[in-house]
Amino acid sequence: MSETTSSSVIEALIYGILNAPIRTYPFPHFYAENIFPPDFYDQIRAHFPEPADFTPIEDTGRVQVLQGDKTDRYVIALDRKKVDPLPPLLKLFWQQMSDILKSPRFGEALLAKFHPYIMQRFGDRIAQASFKPDILLIRDRSEYSLGPHSDAARRVVVFLLYLPENDDHPELGTSVYVPKDPTQKFASGPHYQFEAFHRVFTAPYRRNCAFGFVKSDQSFHGVEPLADKSLERTLIHMFLAEED
């Protein structure tokens, strides 16, 4: 991937993000289509790693589950060192992809997208705050689901890039939820039962589309259980988190 291609991809990402309308209820979020140049999206699919290249997320220390339990989520951290085990051509592509998504210009665009809401959260602290990207390439298999949750407290912006082969199953996207009891308090981090929430929107799981939101006490989102056990979800999960 040439430097010119990388720059073009970054500009396309920024264009798609900054021009996508923000929906403010129940928390600020957006859905954007055609986020990558079409030919580059085809390259992503052509360089997608094999299932054996992924690690169960519970084996990475990123999540805590009961001993013996499986989440059916498999990940590759998009970090230059973590992609070293991939075959050479895949390794080079995903190293360059990591550089694109971790570029300061792209991170600044994500923060700018939600600037008023981030200012509400940080106030005068914003001048001293710094934000670090964390990016996973993800393969969710049939048993994976994610109960409504508002995300870990240190996260600031969450950005999902959908990478399906086709548009046959839009229902596999991330959903937005509202508590059925508006007086009930929910802590940041834990996942809750679907029965306690109304599902109000599902970001369609379609080729080359993205879903993003700013973390708040109301940013309840999740993934519904799959009815068809033969399906899987492929995506990039990125978040910007406040550094200690």
Image (spheres, grey):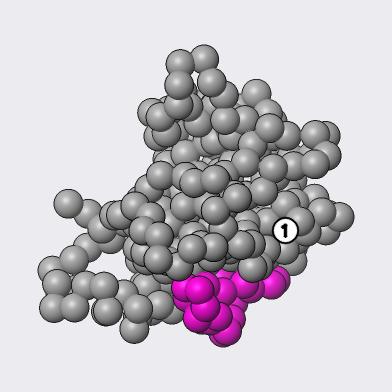
> Badge 1: few (under 14), some or many (20 or more) residues near its Cα, within 10 Å?
many
Picture quadrant where residue 242 is located: bottom left
**Position above or below: 22 against 147:** below
**Residue 31 in picture, x, y percent from top left:** 62, 72
Instruction: State the extent of the magenta-drawn residues as a range.
Output: 6-35
**Residue 217 in picture, x, y percent from top left:** 37, 64
**Position above or below: 103 against 127:** above
**Residue 218 in picture, x, y percent from top left:** 42, 66
Say how many tags the image has.
1
Residue at x 54% of width, y 21% of height: 69
Front-most of residues 241 and 10: 241
**Position above or below: 83 against 166:** above
Residue at x 27% of width, y 79% of height: 120
The residue beneath circle 1 is: 205
Apparent side of residue 40 relative to residue 184 in the rendered image (left or right) = right
Which quadrant does the N terminus fall into? Answer: bottom right
Residue at x 72% of width, y 52% of height: 172
Q: For mark 1, give the secondary structure.
A: loop
Residue at x 18% of width, y 66% of height: 129
Residue type at tag 1: Tyr
